[in-house]
Amino acid sequence: MSSMQEDIQCAGSDTRPPMLDRTDFESWQQRIRLYCLGKDNGENIMKSIKEGPFHMGTVSDVITGGTEGAVQQGPVRARVLNDLSAEEKERYKADIRATNILLQGIPKDIYSLINHYTDAKDIWENVKMILEGSELTKDDRESQLYDEFEHFRQIKGETIQGYYVRFTKLINDMRNIKMTMPYPIFPIYFQ
């Protein structure tokens, strides 16, 4: 039964966005994009994620009642929701929706690292940075994994199953960062 539950969590649904799987960030990005585009106002939701939140700006109210019918401008003030056009209101609502979609699609451990961000773009970029890392971090990680691979040995008293699990984890870590190895991987001692 847990396999079906995991499949549902991975796939998402119409009412809940797909949940992030740390080992497959690229796939999650694509599924979140498709989920957002499938929602009402999907284009604006994606715009919020890519470009950042809608800025309301300022407005100056028109004051009438001057002499000779002259129109005067009042003081500049921040615009409020009632000042927005229907199109601008849709964009504003999309900002809130985009933030909610992203926050619902990430696990608690990642949420705790980015919970102070309120804009969908900031959330998106920081989750991406956490899971992909910067180029320097990626290069450092690749170097570390290459060194670990070269010096991989069985630990005294370790079972073959323990050895296999450690080796599989190492290979998966290498795949996750799309690391390539020069061939042949294992030196040929016998000819």
Image: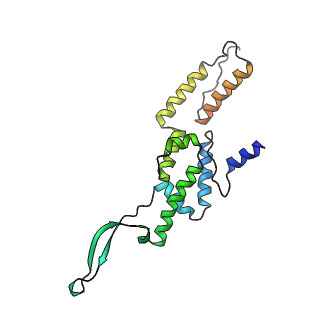
Q: Residue furthest bottom?
A: 68
The residue shown at (50%, 44%) is 114
Which one is in front, 45 or 111? 111
Q: Is residue 134 left or right of residue 61?
A: right
The residue shown at (50%, 46%) is 115
- Which x, y percent locates residue 181? 60, 28
Q: Is residue 168 left or right of residue 113?
A: right
The residue shown at (51%, 48%) is 124
- Which x, y percent locates residue 1? 78, 44
**Residue 166 to residue 78: above or below:** above
**Location of the C terminus (image quadrant):** top right
**How many numbered circles are shown?**
0
- Which x, y percent locates residue 159? 73, 18
**Residue 188 to residue 123: above or below:** above
The residue shown at (48%, 70%) is 87
- Which x, y percent locates residue 11? 69, 50
Q: Residue furthest top?
A: 156
Q: Residue furthest left?
A: 67
- In which quarter of the view is residue 39 placed? bottom right
**Residue 143 to residue 73: above or below:** above
Which one is in front, 55 or 116? 116
